[in-house]
Amino acid sequence: MTAAHGNPSGGPSGKPTGGLTFATVDSEAGLKVALSGPRPDIVMKLRESGLRGRGGAGFPTAVKWTLAAAARGEQKFVVCNADEGEPGTFKDRVILNEFPDLVFAGMTIGGRAIGAREGILYLRAEYTYMRDALEAVLERRRKAGLLGANAGGLAGFEFDIRIQMGAGAYVCGEETALIESLEGQRGEPRNRPPFPVDTGFMGLPSIVNNVETLAWVACIMAKGPEWFKAVGTDKSTGLKLFSVSGDCARPGVYEFPLGITVAKLLEAVGGSDAKAVQVGGASGHCLPRSEFTRALAFEDISTGGSIIVFGQSRDMLEVARNFLEFFVEESCGQCTPCRDGSVKLLEGVELLEEGECSTAYLRELKGLSKTMQLASKCGLGQSAPNAFLSIVEHFQGEILGRSAAGI
Amino acid sequence: MVDKNEDPLTVRTPRSMQAPAGQAATAMPDAIGGTIRAVIDGQTIKVPVGTTILEAAKELGIRIPTLCHHPDLCIAGVCRICTVEVEGQRTLQAACTYPITAPIKVSTSTRTVRQARRHVIDLLLSRHYGECYSCARSNNCELQALAKEYGVEFFRFGQKEHRDHEIEDSSYSVVRDMDKCVLCRRCVRTCIDLQEVGVLEAIGRGDQTAIGTFMNKPLADVVCINCGQCINRCPTGALREKDHIEEIWEAIDDPAKHVVIQTAPSPRAGIGETYGLAPGRALTFEMNTALRRAGFDKVFDTNFTADLTIIEEGTELILRLYNALVKKDPKVALPQLTSCSPGWVKFIEHFYPEYLPNVSSAKSPQQMFGALIKTFYAEKNGIDPKDIVSVSLMPCTAKKFECNRPEMADSGYKDVDFGVTTRELGKMLQQAGIDLPNVPKSEFDDPFGGATGSGVIFGATGGVMEAALRSVVEFITGLKVEDLYEHADIVPVRGFDGVKYLEIKIPDAVGPVPDIIKHLVPDWNWAKGATLKFAVAHGTANAKKIMEDIKAGGKFSECHFIEVMGCPGGCIGGGGQPIPTSPEIRAARARAIYSEDAAYAIRKSHENPAVLKIYEEFLTDGPCGHKSHHLLHTHYTARGKYIA
Amino acid sequence: MLVTEQDRLRQDIDALVERHGHARSALMPILQEVQRNYSLVSPYAMQVIADRLGIHPVEVHGVVSFYSYLSEKPKGRYIVRLCRTISCDMAGKTRIARQLENDLGIEFGETSRDGAFTLEWANCIGMCDQGPALLVNEKVFTRVTPAQVHEIIAECRAIFGNQAHQLREGLHS
Ligand SMILES: Cc1cc2nc3c(=O)[nH]c(=O)nc-3n(C[C@H](O)[C@H](O)[C@H](O)COP(=O)(O)O)c2cc1C
Ligand code: SF4
Ligand code: SF4
Ligand code: SF4
Ligand code: SF4
Ligand code: FES
Ligand code: FES
């Protein structure tokens, strides 16, 4: 085809990703270290590095892996979460395109750490175009002895990776929904506890990690925990990739140390005159200018790396509507607060658009939002009202008392 | 404590997984001796590892509201009405799903919790087509009760004012009103997990999620077995039985019609519940009076044809054994499977049609009675059968389908005109202003009159088997059952184990062949020393286990006779019984039935004088004879599971 | 459906089951391949799959209806999925949408009468920095301008017209 092809690899078309740290790390060096030392060394190094999950929730990777390593099960699984569905997130696409070896090495290291023989990459349906290339990488790794029996040359260590495709459901990025999907079920999140580390895929201990997390694991093994935590904050160590889109001069994938302020980031991407920034995608928070001093770190604003910039002319109510439409459709539909609550919030936005929402009803909707955050079964419903709440809070002047025709 | 007393059949690995067994012990220092300390609303309790907050609270007498939770079903955790605060947790936790695996501090009624519950109720009401005054479940609806409990006095998030769905009433048994569905998925778990029929499932995603059938076809066109178990567990009026109350009143009001009713054993043990009595009190003889007061011309006891079924089905079994063992006929299908549960019959027609030859050709007691009423009874009393309206009171929604089977017209008319459920009759009697628990007792009407204890126990799982064994064993051995089992209680086939198995060794000394079947088998010599093997299953999930085993040539394929009841617990747990249901409620109803059996003077079907008399007067060529074949036996339809 | 078509479908499914196994965990890969090869998972296919995996057809239906990339109704040879999420929205998805509707003569959610195109909305497809973005089957198009819509469609039509017999290959190249 000749028409404007996408550029799945780079950040903004043409922008080289060679500047990312991942480009400087030899994926196999990390694997070698992990396979040559004693098994517990792996989680020890991870603990020292302070690595926390890059998928959004920021769970300490060492803790997750330690639990899975300790859990009993005749078989265990390493699952790489490549469902990247959070609006505004695309860094995993770039990693899988440019640095797949790092991710597969990270999975292999996970296999050794917890005692798994099988790794599964759950790739979202929208990324099917990457599948063949990834399969080719896997095949190359098998041929090179990095996967399969005696993987990486370690006698008795068997580990292989297969790819399973998603089928178009944002909620399957939630780890237990992802596992349900792997098991051939509707992607409905499970009750937790129990957690996947002891009752995961097929009821067996499993670790589910984000693409970027696994790539960093390989890097940490190669370069050591000290190298990793040299940047970042005490509680949020290391570098993080950010997916930047919206009203800025240079959208794309960026690498910054955790703890960077919103303002600094905006400066780097050419979005300093923004009216607001959505951090963390549809399920994240909308920050007004007054909060641009806040830090992108787990102890302040936790994020999987989605940064969406809103310019001065944007209608924030439209933003809220867009996100709520997303949740109404992408909720798995099993639990009441999320399924029906999202609908009520969306209807509320419609009332606001029409200029027909009383302050009292808006207060009611805020209360409902709180219930959704507290009582929903999974992270989707718990975060679905975030954007609505922050927009209603910070841009009240803009959204109240409209006339039906518009502003 | 927390003796859940669950049917074993309901304990299966739930799809969304329960507490992990091994996890707690290692991680939790306090888990000494497998118990853990939980503090709930300031009260302390020690519970076994893995006990849910809901169970622990119940032990303490603290009520946490539930909606999607049901004692027969695996945990879902979807309605979120049961959320509570757990110290140290950022979000509220669903009490029904949360396993206690570490010391825990819970608050069940904080401001936040109450607010969240109120919101959940408000949200459910906003999508619910509430028309309580005209709803079948008014006053027995869990949503209505919750709304009342939480003081809903206005619709915070609006109310559904228009229907989005048409009422789906294609089925003879189950009516679906999806505008009243609250998506608790109890029906889904019932149909897929408990019954393993697989008719209902959540379809779609997000706000489009709805409970549907395969390709959203009408219930009549899919593999539904009409068991009504989904109705029993639906908290709202979204599922109900197809109701015939008005037609029956019309018939009663029509002076030209002779309206008779037969009553099965299980409704008697259940109907008190529709009057608010505790489960387990049989109102058999009060009901006779009440039915006459309501306007029925005759009240008959289905147990009469239950006894008749035992004779016909037992004779059929003896013939099959004789033909297989003595005549070496390779075509004889064994094990013989019971046929009195129409839910089970439709199950096998759909899922194991190749085994239909194994199903006894004897009709169910309801249909035998129907055929006799419009022939024998009509003749005897000089009533034109076309003027008879024959009603049957059943614990069962599948009976509504059964009486509408086209082949069920051997009298020349529709043998049974209406099957009504215990719930419907409860409503009728209330409409008639009858205070059922307090009316005087009275007997059943002749000529079918009294029954035996064997007929009564048909209502509980194992009952048909026990009744059959009481007769067959006596026939063959010539011994009294009482000599083999104390009080003739064949205990091994009782109880709620999903699958029961029993072997009986025929002694080397056998008795004479009773007169009634003398023309069929010359002697019992061939049965000497034989070991007869029997099995009992209730709930179609257990039936499936047995059928798969038979298919694989396992131990059940060597059985001679297997009783299968479609519903968990047998008919006492039937889909037409009062709501709610639970293992405890079914056990209480079963106790009522067994104590009624114990009170009967005659407890064996073949000793029922009325039964013996009908073979003398009417079915003169005996059990499995020509006339009985015409009126009391039937055939089945291989339906298969594929849907066009 | 003709009996022969049903037979072929059944054989295809049996081959897939052979490859992916009889466990329920094989369901998604099987459904995905059936969808890919037939542009839908038909009711008959669902029943055969259910039978082979030992589950209920309604469960398969439940799964098919859950995922956006599986469908019980036939889809066009080319499924155009335009992202409607916020970044693409801000980058001008509305005009692309209108032009797609104009050029295809169908609305979102519809399939063209010749069976060539299905037009659908997508939620974020991970190209937010290069919006407006859309997918045609597996292929991604970014920074799409209204003027390019015509070009993209023409290209698909060319393949659809010329290689009708090789559609399955052409479609997923
Ligand atoms: C609705 C929802 C969607 C999610 N989507 C993703 C996703 O696309 N990718 C991802 O890595 N994690 C996603 N997560 C987080 C995962 O549940 C899980 O925490 C993560 O994969 C763990 O990996 P990490 O510890 O390496 O971050 C999502 C969570 C929720 C609640
Ligand atoms: S919160 Fe939403 S996505 Fe999560 S389980 Fe509930 S309905 Fe499903
Ligand atoms: S009546 Fe029985 S088979 Fe039919 S839908 Fe209900 S539970 Fe399923
Ligand atoms: S039909 Fe009844 S049981 Fe089924 S989900 Fe709806 S409310 Fe629950
Ligand atoms: S077990 Fe009883 S109530 Fe249930 S379907 Fe069978 S006959 Fe009806
Ligand atoms: S009763 Fe606990 S979530 Fe429904
Ligand atoms: S918002 Fe369109 S691709 Fe992400």
Image (tube, coloured by chain):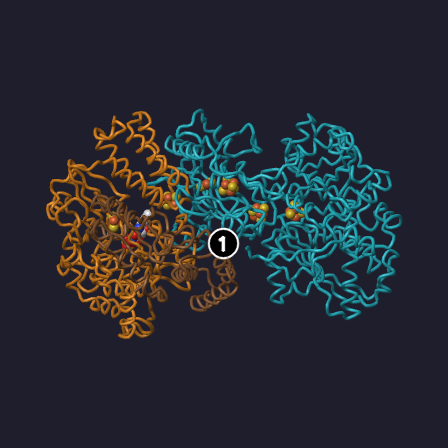
Chain colours: A orange, B cyan, C brown
Q: Tell me which residue sits at (80%, 37%) in the image.
A: B444
SS under mark 1 = loop
Q: Tell me which residue sits at (42%, 27%) in the image.
A: B155
Q: Nearer the viewer, residue B110 or B60?
A: B110
Can you say which quadrant of the picture contains the C terminus of chain B?
bottom right
Determine crowd level at label 1: few under 14, some 14-19, many 20+ residues with C-alpha closer than 10 A.
Answer: few
Q: Nearer the viewer, residue A128 or B93?
A: A128
Q: Is residue B508 visible?
A: yes
- Find residue C21 and report its horizontal and vertical position in percent: 45, 66
| B144 lies above or below B173 | above
- Which chain's residue wears label 1? B
- Find residue B619 and report its horizontal and vertical position in percent: 85, 51
Q: Nearer the viewer, residue B166 or B398?
A: B166
Q: Is residue C149 left or right of residue B64?
A: left
- Find residue B81 and report its horizontal and vertical position in percent: 44, 37
Q: Quadrant of residue A267?
A: top left
Q: Is mark 1 within 8 Å of ligand 6?
A: no
Question: Of the residues shown, which amino acid type is indicated by label 1?
Answer: Thr
| B134 lies above or below B540 | above
Q: Nearer the viewer, residue B471 or C154?
A: C154
Residue that mark 1 sits on: B13
Q: Is residue C173 left or right of residue B182?
A: left
Q: Quadrant of residue B286?
A: top right
- Find residue A89 and report its horizontal and vertical position in percent: 24, 50
Q: Is residue B41 visible?
A: no
